[in-house]
Image: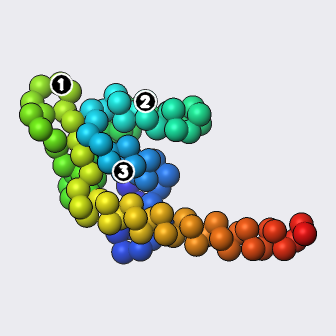
């Protein structure tokens, strides 16, 4: 996972995972959230998702939630994860504003 915690861009998948975990979810619910929010454009396989979840947990961006024993472990974003997601939102807003100014100026 190439995500940079020092202000660099998150991958789209990582950002969607973090967004999905503002409320606790298990893996399948995360996959459904991402597929629904992207209109099917992004559909994660179980191996990709659980690899990403392990990495995000190691980084401290998400954590296990509640009684997560058994097959359906639930995850929730941490305070650090919220900070990372908020920084990514600001980065994307800046990018979008710049693009609108440039593209809008060309087509006006």
Q: Identify the image quadrant of the C terminus.
A: bottom right
Is residue 36 among what the camera can see?
A: yes
Residue 26 locus on image (x, y percent): 27, 32
Residue 40 locus on image (x, y percent): 57, 32
Residue 5 vs residue 72: left or right?
right
Residue 94 locus on image (x, y percent): 58, 72
Disc 2 crowd rating (10 Å Cα; few below 14, some 14-19, many 20+) is some
Q: Residue at x 48, y 63 (%)?
A: 89
Residue receiving disc 2: 32
Dot 2 falls on a residue whose secondary structure is: helix
**Residue 23 vertical placement versus 57 (above, below):** above
- Of marks 1 and 2, the one in the foreground: 2
Dot 3 falls on a residue whose secondary structure is: helix
Dot 1 falls on a residue whose secondary structure is: loop
Disc 3 crowd rating (10 Å Cα; few below 14, some 14-19, many 20+) is many
Residue 63 locus on image (x, y percent): 19, 49
Residue 62 image label: none
Q: CA distance from mark 1 to mark 2?
A: 17 Å
Q: Are marks 1 and 3 in contact (CB under 8 Å)?
A: no
Q: Quadrant of residue 30?
A: top left
Q: Earlier in the sequence, mark 1 or mark 3?
A: 3
Residue 18 image label: 3
Tell me the colour scheme of the image: rainbow
Residue 80 vs residue 33: left or right?
left
Q: Earlier in the sequence, mark 2 or mark 3?
A: 3
Residue 71 image label: 1
Q: CA distance from mark 2 to mark 3?
A: 14 Å
Q: Residue at x 39, y 49 (%)?
A: 19
Name the foreground residue: 13 vs 85: 85
Is residue 55 among what the camera can see?
A: no
- Of marks 1 and 3, the one in the foreground: 3
């Amino acid at each position: 996972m190439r995500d940079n915690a020092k202000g660099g861009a998150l991958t789209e998948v990582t950002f969607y995972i973090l967004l999905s975990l503002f409320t606790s979810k298990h893996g399948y619910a995360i996959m459904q959230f991402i597929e629904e929010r992207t209109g099917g454009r992004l559909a994660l396989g179980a191996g990709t998702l659980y690899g990403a979840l392990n990495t995000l947990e190691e980084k401290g961006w998400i954590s296990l939630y509640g009684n997560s024993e058994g097959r359906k472990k639930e995850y929730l974003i941490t305070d650090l994860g919220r900070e990372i997601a908020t920084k990514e939102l600001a980065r994307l807003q800046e990018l979008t504003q710049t693009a609108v100014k440039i593209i809008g100026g060309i087509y006006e």
